[in-house]
Amino acid sequence: MLTKNEIRIWRMRKSADISYLTESEMSFYEKYSSPDSKAAYLKGRFGVRSFASLYASLAPSDVKIEISKSGKPFFTNIEDLHFNISHSGSEVAIAFSTKPVGFDMELLDRKRDFRAIANRFFTNQESNEVKSAEEYGNELFVRIWTSKEAILKLSGEGLAGGLNRAMALREREGRLADQQIHLSRLAWEGVIGCVASFDPILEVKIEVH
């Protein structure tokens, strides 16, 4: 079981069982045109039900998931268990916690004009830091981006909440408007990520499934 203030990250590396999808999820799954997007969605839903069933001692088919108006998925029949899914390319991972959690990760080798994105969505200070980072600019961009998105996913707003409102003040401290957010950085082969919580984060464990 999860302990208080622990966040467990499961990297979904194995194949997923499509029978874990509900009828409505299957309809959503079939709408994806990209094989990678279909695979990521399936791994995410499969992983959520697989591990929630272990944590809550339920059959996977009894794990009920709904989507909030802002697009954040949540359990409707499991108390004190929260999750957040993130995927980038073929990499899919899920954060579980006994308290609300936000989680984002990005592949470092994704091709993008990170300076232009930073100039559009980051604060002036953040954008200037990325521009001046030279060969480390993409890594710094990803660190800032994942922090911001983790904070907004924690709040339930997602990117619609405004990237400029979510700020990583220090390595383990962020802010959303006037609210303090606790952060923890993550990294594994070719990936940088961040988890966010309203409460202090005592431990983060990364597991591979």
Image: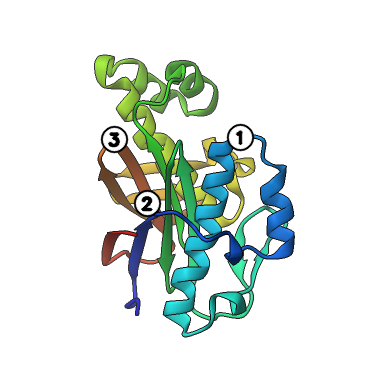
Residue pictured at 57% horizontal, 40% vertical:
37
Q: Where is residue 100 in the image (x, y as percent from the top left)?
A: 49, 66
Q: Position of residue 203 (x, y in %)?
A: 26, 65
Q: Which of marks 2 and 1 precedes in the sequence? A: 2
Which mark's residue is nearer the viewer, 3 or 2? Answer: 2
User: Mark 3 packing: few (<14 Cα in 10 Å), some, or many (20+)?
Assistant: few
The amino acid pointed to by label 3 is Gly
The amino acid pointed to by label 2 is Arg
Q: Judge by depth and name the residue closer to the eye, 112 or 35.
A: 35
Location of the N terminus by quadrant is bottom left
Q: Name the residue under label 3.
A: 190
The amino acid pointed to by label 1 is Ser
User: Mark 2 packing: few (<14 Cα in 10 Å), some, or many (20+)?
Assistant: few
Contact, mark 3 vs mark 2 (Cβ under 8 Å): no
Disc 3 is placed on an element classified as loop
Residue pictured at 73% horizontal, 63% vertical:
23
Q: Where is residue 65 in the image (x, y as percent from the top left)?
A: 63, 68
Disc 1 is placed on an element classified as loop
Q: Name the residue under label 2.
A: 13
